[in-house]
Amino acid sequence: MIIYICDDSKADLLRLSHYLNRTITHLSTPASIQSFTSGQDLLTAFDDAPKKPVLIFLDIYMPDSDGMQTAALLREKGFTGGIIFTTSSTRHAMESYNVNALYYLQKPYDSNDFLNAMKRCSDIFDKAAKTYTFLSKGSEISIPLKDILFFETGRHVTLLHTASEVLSFTRVLSDVCTDFEDNPDFIRVGHSYLVNRLYISPYTESEITMSDSTVILIPSRLRKAICQNLQASLES
């Protein structure tokens, strides 16, 4: 699990890193922190990263790309994780709702303020801790659910796609779909695909484009139901 923190004040960055390090040691899944002093540097790292962060702390007042602009660009790039703003002013508190921010942490904050912010992240950490385990080439592999883009039927195997690799295992897709019956993030598309809706980029009534640019055709008989499902997911 990766957490980004961004602040042009090195003192504030160190303080935030200190609070975070004390907190993540108690999480059930390993976490790492990556620090940035500008929104542009963060966006560049985000674009290049094979594994995306689950949570981002953003200072609002930064010179090149302020926190609000950076957050808006992250959402445009498909970032679905948590955003927490850190700032010395309450001026942008209402604006933070436009990018679906989890919390607005006003400087100077103390450990109690920080813990209140982290309580808003419990669902994010729970999701990051969940994995899908399978046997591949004789080895047991566990992949965080948040890293799975989609499953695809292969030749006598099922292919699991992440942003950085494709793994195969000898299990039919219908059985894999059974494992995800109670997980609304995963949507079956015909006989050949099970997709993570969090990584759907645009979609039309006839096709879905995933964040890795894979285009998945929606069978004509299923178009209405799948589009309704996707629209309901976006509105929930």
Image: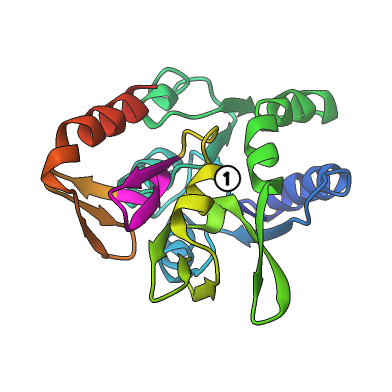
Where the C terminus falls, by quadrant?
Answer: top left
Residue 213 point in image, percent of width and height: 26, 65
| Residue nearest the viewer, comparing 140 with 116 | 140
Residue 110 point in image, percent of width and height: 81, 28
Q: Is residue 66 magenta?
A: no
| Residue nearest the viewer, comparing 174 with 10 | 174
- Residue count near mark 1 (Cα–Cα under 10 Å), binned few <14, some 14–19, many ≥20: few
Q: Residue at x 38, y 65 (%)?
A: 153
Circle 1 SS class: helix
Residue 156 as seen in the image, left or right of residue 114: left
Where the N terminus falls, by quadrant?
Answer: bottom right
Q: Residue at x 69, y 40 (%)?
A: 125
9 up-or-down from 95: above or below: below
Q: Amino acid at mark 1?
A: Asp
Residue lying furthest bottom: 137
Which image quadrant for residue 225? top left
Q: Residue at x 73, y 51 (%)?
A: 11
Is residue 139 something one can see in this rendering?
Answer: yes
Residue 92 point in image, percent of width and height: 44, 24
Residue that carries the numbered disc 1 in the rendered image: 179
- Magenta segment's dominant SS is strand
Segment colored magenta: 186-200
Residue 204 as seen in the image, left or right of residue 85: left
Residue 229 point in image, percent of width and height: 30, 30
9 up-or-down from 87: above or below: below
Residue 223 as seen in the image, left or right of residue 9: left
Which image quadrant for residue 86? top right
Name the image colouring: rainbow
Q: Residue at x 55, y 71 (%)?
A: 170
